[in-house]
Amino acid sequence: MIDLETSKLTPVDVLRARARQGVENGAVTEGYDANREEIIKLLNSSLATELVCVLRYKRHYFMASGLKASIAADEFLEHAKQEGEHADKLAERIVQLGGEPEFNPDLLSKNSHAQYVAGNSLKEMVYEDLVAERIAVDSYREIIQYIGDKDPTTRRIFEDILAQEEEHADDMADIYGSL
C-alpha cells in the first residue's frame, strides 16, 4: 500500500484546489508539462498529413485499373477510411488542448509531411502511397520521441496511429512487390 504521506504524489487537498483554478482550460491542468502551442502545431501538421493521404487514397481508389486493380483498390479505400479516423483523433486532441484544427484546403498540402502525388499507373499509385506511409512512420516516430513523457495522451494517440501506418506500409509494400 502506498503511504501518501511519504510518496511523491500530490496530496489530494492540493489536487482539489488546483483543479478549481483555470477550469476554462478543460483537460489542460497545471501538471501539463508540454509546450501546448508546439504540440498543437505538431498535431495540425499531422492532421494535414492524414487529410492529404485521405485525398490521395480516394483518388487511387477511383483511378485504379488493371489486372490487380481490385485488390489494390480495396486497400486504397480501407486506408482512406482509416486515415480519416486518424484525422478525427488528431482534430479532437487539438480541441482538447485549446487549439483549432486547421482544415483550410489551401494549407493542407503546405503543412503536410507527405506530398500529394497522384501517380498514373497502378504501380505508381501504390509506390506513392508506400512513400507517404514511410514518411508518416518516420515523422510520427520522431514526434513520439519528442513528446516523451510530457503529454502521455497525445503520445498514445500518435503511438496508435503509428502502429496502423506501419501496417499500411506493409500492405502497400506487399502490393507493390506483386505488381
Image: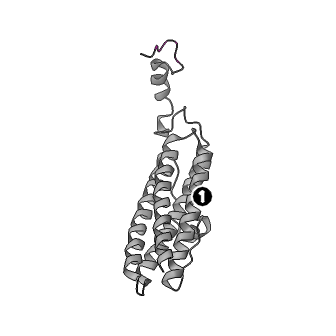
Is 58 left or right of 132, judged from the image as shown? left
Q: For residue 99: magenta?
A: no
Residue 172 shows up from this direction: yes
- Image coordinates of residue 61 in percent, x first then y, are 41, 78
Front residue (pair 83, 47): 83
Q: Quadrant of the N terminus?
A: top left
State the residue at coordinates (57%, 48%). 144
State the residue at coordinates (45%, 23%). 16
Q: Secondary structure at mark 1?
A: helix
Please identify the residue farthest to the bottom as the structure is shown: 66
- Image coordinates of residue 76 in percent, x first then y, are 42, 73
- Image coordinates of residue 95 in percent, x first then y, are 47, 50
- The residue that mark 1 highlights is 138
Q: Is residue 12 above or below residue 26?
A: above
Residue 20 shows up from this direction: no
State the residue at coordinates (56%, 51%). 40
Front residue (pair 178, 113): 178
State the residue at coordinates (46%, 74%). 175
Is 85 left or right of 141, judged from the image as shown? left
* Residue kind at label 1, given as amino acid type: Asp
- Image coordinates of residue 131 in percent, x first then y, are 57, 70
Front residue (pair 165, 41): 165
Tell me which segment is drawn in magenta: 3-7
**Badge 1 local density, few (<14 within 10 Å), some, or many (20+)?**
some
